[in-house]
Image (cartoon, rainbow, N blue to C red):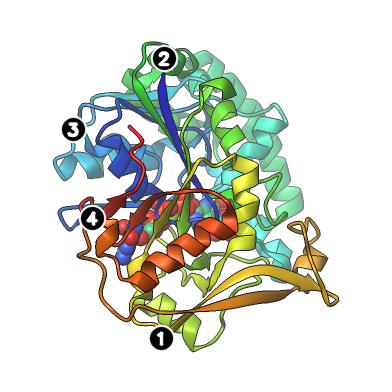
Amino acid sequence: MATAMVIGTQWGDEGKGKIVDYLAQKADVVVRSQGGNNAGHTVVVDDQAFALRLLPSGILFSDKTCIIGSGVVVNPAVLLEEIAGMTSKGVQISKLEISTRAHVIMPYHIRIDEEDEKLKGDAKIGTTKNGIGPCYADKVNRVGIRVGDLMNKDVFAEKLRMNIELKNRLFEKYYGCEGFDYDTVLKEYLGYADQIRQYVKDTDYSANVYVAEGKKVLFEGAQATMLDLDHGTYPFVTSSNPTAGGACTGSGVGPRRMENIVGVVKAYTTRVGAGPFPAEQINEIGDMLRNTGHEFGTVTGRPRRCGWLDTAVVKYAAMLNSLDYLAITRLDILDNLDTIKICTGYKFKGELLKEYPASLEVLENVEPVYEEMPGWKTPISKCKSYDELPEAARHYVERISQLVGVPLGIVSVGPNRNQTIVLKKIF
Ligand code: GDP
Ligand code: IMO
Ligand code: MG
């Protein structure tokens, strides 16, 4: 058995795509198990950037099997566009599998997402408006349409009719906006069905067979721990479980099969969308991180909120995901700083908190506690080994590992594959 998992430890965009692509070099199978096209994973190969949203980041290797698992929500139009985009860049898509159990994002999900955000006004979540939440809501409400349903014209027609009837009533009477025409949506989606049919199968079985055969199977997390529906900064979260447990549920592979759980930690913190962010820097530090790191959303283009690294967050993520190793990314973005701060915990009403607060009312009023370290003031993106890193950079990542209580596995100093320093070989 040889499995590994890549999980975001903060609020997303930690560089999961880069780490997955790096580890995929030695893997046989890469599995996405939750989220949808709210994810934006950028992989850089020989300075050419590939932006992936639904396709697993192993797709750049034509010999790797890539699975879109049961827990993913699939917008077929986006998926087909992504496949076409990859094909036009010379990527051969031959070993893709899409779970028959994955739920389908319908146009009414996207409209509900948009209308809900408008209605919420100042309380809006700042979603990616891709219909992710409403699609998962239908799944939980047991009225969702699955990829397998889409493969059967009669079943799909029936389920779509019921859904359009219900949703149109909602659009007309509650949202006060236009609904959808049944025949138009039916025709559009049956067209998608024919184009994705070749990839659809019961991936709960195939994923387990690959693991049992001893293939190297890599689970690719999307979003991140603090966006987890159950454990994140609710309600400012996504609608799936990006934590390690979610990889089991969303792939159908049990927890005893999961090894080498790698938590990806950006060397500072970013967040897109609304919600508490104690170590946020709304000042020249935040601006510097955004400008140096080009911190603008891949999916929405929104400027990302930036702040110091918060090990209270990463320590909480280490616990929730039972992390084995840390992969620290984007260390090079800190190259020019004289001093670097780490948020090591929070004070609330003068008392140091021992646990990550569940209450937003507490989290919004905490006072971050910082420790300060000297910067290295040297470009590190050409460093090929751990020893080549400046002493101050080594101290910084070692201090993170110490504060979080998880050993270092990878230190990344640039977006390319050869800008990856491996301290623990995983495959
Ligand atoms: P993901 O959603 O977690 O996969 O992360 P994103 O792809 O949204 O954002 C991470 C960005 O950082 C991408 O553009 C990566 O190519 C880039 N990246 C990853 N690791 C490094 C690194 O170590 N240094 C630099 N400079 N960029 C990196
Ligand atoms: P990757 O995989 C960063 C955020 C949105 C919003 C909240 C809910 O690239 O790290 P949703 O559309 O999911 O209902 O939005 O979650 N969000 C992300 N932020 N990276 C992501 O994915 C995200 N996916 C969702 O900005 O705050
Ligand atoms: Mg991203």
Q: Is residue 170 left or right of residue 375?
A: right
Choose the circle earlier in sequence order: 2 or 1: 2
Disc 4 vs disc 1: which is toward the camera?
1
Tell me the residue that label 4 is attached to: 416
Residue located at (50% from left, 33% from top): 33
Q: CA distance from mark 4 to mark 1?
A: 26 Å
Q: CA distance from mark 3 to mark 1?
A: 45 Å
Question: Residue 133 got which mark?
Answer: none
Q: Is mark 1 within 8 Å of ligand 1?
A: no
Q: Residue reaching furthest bottom? A: 284
Badge 2 crowding class, 10 Å Cα cut-off, few under 14, some 14 to 19, many 20 or more, is some
Tell me the residue that label 2 is attached to: 206
Tell me the residue that label 1 is attached to: 338
Choose the circle earlier in sequence order: 4 or 2: 2
Residue 363 percent location from the top left of the image? 75, 66
- Identify which residue, 330 or 83, lies in the foreground: 330
Q: Is mark 2 within 8 Å of ligand 2?
A: no
The secondary element bearing badge 2 is classed as helix
Q: Is residue 121 left or right of residue 313?
A: right
Amino acid type for the residue under numbered disc 1: Asp
Badge 1 crowding class, 10 Å Cα cut-off, few under 14, some 14 to 19, many 20 or more, is few
Amino acid type for the residue under numbered disc 4: Asn
Choose the circle earlier in sequence order: 3 or 4: 3
- Identify which residue, 239 or 207, lies in the foreground: 207
Q: CA distance from mark 2 to mark 1?
A: 51 Å
Residue 34, above or below 178: above
The answer to whether residue 179 is visible is no
